[in-house]
């Protein structure tokens, strides 16, 4: 671990800004058509999009997905704006990988967000593969404490590690290590991918280890393979694999047997409130967006609030037009799907 972890975060942000095709624009959710109700028998005013997560009420099922953290002014501003907006709108916020705070103490300030977001759901983040590279219970506890987190994401990113020159690619024995963590950590663990999707087999391994929250993070949105290509050693491996993985709606469908036993989170290529509504219909309890929040977060907390409010308006409009008065009626209600192309 070195300063490289910190520099990498800035390089990722630059790659996303300079190359619009790091967002693969898969539009996979557009293939799903929902039943429009001309007689919805509910009032737009009284549609209730609120949900509960970790004992807290969110204004609608939105998660600002894990992005960043580090010892850099820009990164600190991004996280501060995201935290202030998440609190004002009462949506969940996950931070980016906290690995950097163990090599660069100056990065801790970017994760110490409880003051800015005293009440809403905050989720920490550590790379699961780091459990094979010196990380353990102590670092996970510290990550939770530094953020004042309600829960901790462990991200799984074998493609991203495989296409970068300095990648950590020994993923052996992680399920057993997850079980050890689940048994001792004071907060729930969530497993996530970063844009290739969790397979049913991954969920089964995580579930057997005691994990009950799975963020599918499928393909169709941000491509880490393409981002790493820009930081690479001249090889085109990152480009070859830029669309690798399972699109998020398909990953959700494949995870259907786990609904009820585990909490599913949809992320990867969700770009509006209609994609969020379709995710809930496919069984997601929470919907994560990452890259769409990057530009507003650079600007101000107000800009992030405006982006969240637009998503909420789109989401509640879709609920109204589906005749769904609350989330419970819509969750895993596949009868609302007319057609999938
Ligand atoms: C700038 C940026 C940084 C990210 N950093 C992390 C990270 O540190 N840890 C993580 O688990 N996921 C990270 N992700 C992945 C997202 O949390 C999410 O799983 C993925 O980008 C798909 O969402 P999207 O298509 O809405 O961007 C990052 C995404 C972006 C755009």
Image (cartoon, rainbow, N blue to C red):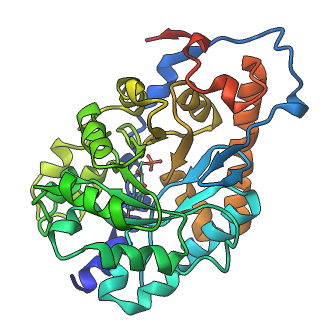
The percent coordinates of residue 302 (x first, y second) are: 74, 65
The image shows residue 222 at horizontal and vertical percentages of 39, 48
Rendered position, 273 above or below 28 = below
Q: Residue at x 21, y 62 (%)?
A: 129
Taking depth in this image into account, of 336 and 15 the one nearest to the observer is: 336
In this picture, residue 68 sits left or right of residue 135:
right
Q: Residue at x 70, y 51 (%)?
A: 58
Is 170 drawn above or below residue 204 in the view shown?
below
Q: Is residue 74 visible?
A: no
- Ligand 1 image-quadrant field: bottom left
* Up/down of 254 relative to 193, above or below: above
Which quadrant would the N terminus be assigned to in this image? Answer: bottom left
- The residue that appears at 52% across and 47% down in the rendered structure is 288
Give whichever of 72, 258 is nearer the camera: 258
Which of the 4 image quadrants contains residue 79?
Answer: bottom right
- Where in the figure is residue 141, as x and y percent of width and height? 40, 75
Query: Position of 166 compared to 272: left or right?
Result: left
Q: Quadrant of residue 88?
A: bottom right
Q: Residue at x 73, y 55 (%)?
A: 306
């Amino acid at each position: 671990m070195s300063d490289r972890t910190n520099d990498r975060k800035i390089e990722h942000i630059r790659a996303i800004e300079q190359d619009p095709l790091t967002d693969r624009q898969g539009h996979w959710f557009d293939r799903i058509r929902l039943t429009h109700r001309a007689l919805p028998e509910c009032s737009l005013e009284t549609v209730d999009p609120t949900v509960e997560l970790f004992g807290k009420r969110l204004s609608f099922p939105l998660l600002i997905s894990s992005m960043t953290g580090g010892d850099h002014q820009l990164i600190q501003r991004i996280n501060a704006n995201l935290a202030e907006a998440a609190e004002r709108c009462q949506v969940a916020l996950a931070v980016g990988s906290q690995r950097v705070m163990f090599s660069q103490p100056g990065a801790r300030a970017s994760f110490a967000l409880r003051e800015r977001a005293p009440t809403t759901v905050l989720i920490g983040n550590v790379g699961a593969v780091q459990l094979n590279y010196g990380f353990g219970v102590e670092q996970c506890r510290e990550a939770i404490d530094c953020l004042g987190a309600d829960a901790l994401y462990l991200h799984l990113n074998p493609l991203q590690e495989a296409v970068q020159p300095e990648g950590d690619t020994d993923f052996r024995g992680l399920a057993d290590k997850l079980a050890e963590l689940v048994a001792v950590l004071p907060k729930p663990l969530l497993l996530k991918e970063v844009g290739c999707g969790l397979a049913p087999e991954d969920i089964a391994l995580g579930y057997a280890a005691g994990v009950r929250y799975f963020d599918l993070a499928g393909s169709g949105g941000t491509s880490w393979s393409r981002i790493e290509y820009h930081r690479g050693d001249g090889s085109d491996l990152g480009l070859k694999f830029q669309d690798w993985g399972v699109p998020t709606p398909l990953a959700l469908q494949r995870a259907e047997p786990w609904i009820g036993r585990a909490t599913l989170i949809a992320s990867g290529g969700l770009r509006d409130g209609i994609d969020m509504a379709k995710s809930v219909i496919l069984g997601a309890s929470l919907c994560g967006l990452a890259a769409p929040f990057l530009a507003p977060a650079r600007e101000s907390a107000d800009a992030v609030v405006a982006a969240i409010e637009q998503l909420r308006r789109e989401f509640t409009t879709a609920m109204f037009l589906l005749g769904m008065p609350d989330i419970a009626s819509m969750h895993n209600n596949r009868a609302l799907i007319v057609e999938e192309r």
